[in-house]
Image (cartoon, rainbow, N blue to C red):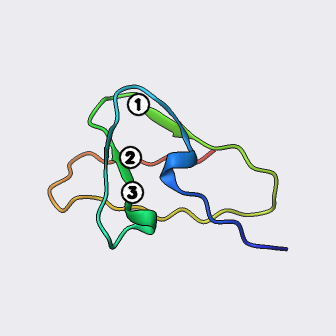
Amino acid sequence: MPVTYIDDTDLIYTGQWSIGGTPSEYLSTTHGTNEVGASASFTFLGTSISVYGTIAANAKHVKSIYT
């Protein structure tokens, strides 16, 4: 099965998100939020998914849920 790479710019966001990025991140893009209840979603048809992200060293109460 072929591998498809998805950038954070391909996701659907709800809530207030900021856009940034550094050269060490995929396509130099990233999204971030401090808003409780904010979400990002992506729907795919396949058998598995891998998620990679950046979390700031000073981040508190970070939660990632995948359903």
* Sequence order check, earlier mark of 2 and 3: 3
Gap in angstroms between the C-alphas marked 2 and 3: 20 Å
Identify the residue under disc 1.
38
Q: How many marks?
A: 3
Give the label on residue 29, or none: 3
Residue 7, image x, y percentages: 53, 57
Residue flagged by tag 2: what amino acid is it? Answer: Lys
Q: Horizontal placement of 34 versus 30: left or right? A: left
Q: Nearer the viewer, residue 19 or 33?
A: 19
Element assignment for label 3: loop
Are the residues at dot 1 and dot 3 in contact (C-beta closer than 8 Å)? Answer: no
Element assignment for label 1: loop
At 49% from the left and 51% from the top, the residue drawn is 8
Identify the residue under disc 2.
63
Residue 24, image x, y percentages: 33, 73
Residue flagged by tag 3: what amino acid is it? Answer: Thr
Give the label on residue 48, or none: none
Gap in angstroms between the C-alphas marked 1 and 3: 18 Å
Quadrant position of the N terminus in the picture:
bottom right
